[in-house]
Image (cartoon, rainbow, N blue to C red):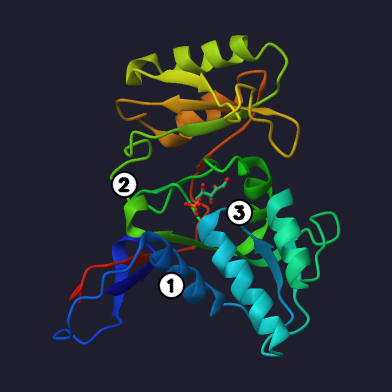
Amino acid sequence: MAIAWSETAASMEALSLSPPMSPPVILTQDELKKIAAYKAVEFVESGMVLGLGTGSTAKHAVDRIGELLRQGKLSNIVGIPTSKKTQEQAVSLGIPLSDLDNYPTIDLAIDGADEVDPHLNLVKGRGGSLLREKMVEGACKKFVCIVDESKLVKHLGGSGLALPVEIVPFCWKFTANKLQKLFQGSDCVAKLRNDGEGKPFVTDNGNYIVDLYLKKEMGDLQVASDAILRIAGVVEHGMFLDMATTVIVAGAELGFR
Ligand SMILES: O=C(CO)[C@H](O)[C@H](O)COP(=O)(O)O
């Protein structure tokens, strides 16, 4: 079992947690997420303003921060949550909270991702919190992204799963069609996300999400990002380009190094 972490794509480093000859340990995906999360929390120091991510991986980090506060190993932390769900979790753990209005600069954010490419560009938002995540993580001095190895892709969109785009509900079909047309060269299919009960999924900001399924690469990601954001009706998209300063990847590869 190994953990890899990286400051840049070119300098991927690895830490083997098991001696090379020990028997292989089979870890679940959730255990790998927890390992990555705990490693990231080692970056947290007392007195920091922290961006608290959303999702099953980030949840482990928030739990750990709460635990260290309870144990008195951390103090004077202010958390800036990236979703109502994380806000509820942090409140239940007694983590003091504030917002970007009061803390426009954040020391460190820890959050998961849906895809990570070799340049540390991310897809986020399959949990639906991409707008607040981008606002919070865009205000950070350091953004540590935590994933298990299943999130690594050769290029964004490469998992075949959704690239989420948050849009206003007004005439959502019009906006979804514009998005699909924009990426027709990538054989894009745009689908409105539903809540599992036949209604549109509604974000914490009262918006909808259109998920873009791309069969081919998008080409220049910055050009694609700018083009999406130029469509009236789009609020934000889930490509986080050049934002992660560190990516911690937990993987099950014995003898990775
Ligand atoms: O972007 C996100 C939520 O909007 C999550 O960070 C992303 O979906 C990863 O989730 P998980 O840790 O549950 O795999």
Q: Nearer the viewer, residue 118 or 161?
A: 161
Look at the picture and state if 219 lies above or below 61: above
Is the residue 185 above or below the residue 114 in the image? above
Identified by mark 1, the residue type is: Ile
Where residue 70 sits in the image (x, y, percent)? 72, 84
Q: In this view of the protein, which residue sits in the foreground, 135 or 96?
A: 96
Task: Provide the residue designation for mark 3.
Answer: 54
Looking at numbered disc 3 in the image, what kind of residue is underneath it? Thr
**Mark whose residue sits in front, 2 or 1:** 1
* Labels 1 and 3: the sequence-earlier one: 1
Q: Earlier in the sequence, mark 3 or mark 2?
A: 3
Residue 177 position in % (x across, y down): 53, 11
Q: Residue furthest left?
A: 21
Element assignment for label 1: helix
| Numbered circle sitting on residue 17 | none
Q: Is residue 7 visible?
A: no
CA gap, disc 2 and disc 1: 20 Å
Q: Disc 2 marks which amino acid?
A: Val
Label 1 belongs to which residue?
Answer: 35
Residue at 52% x, 40% y: name it: 126
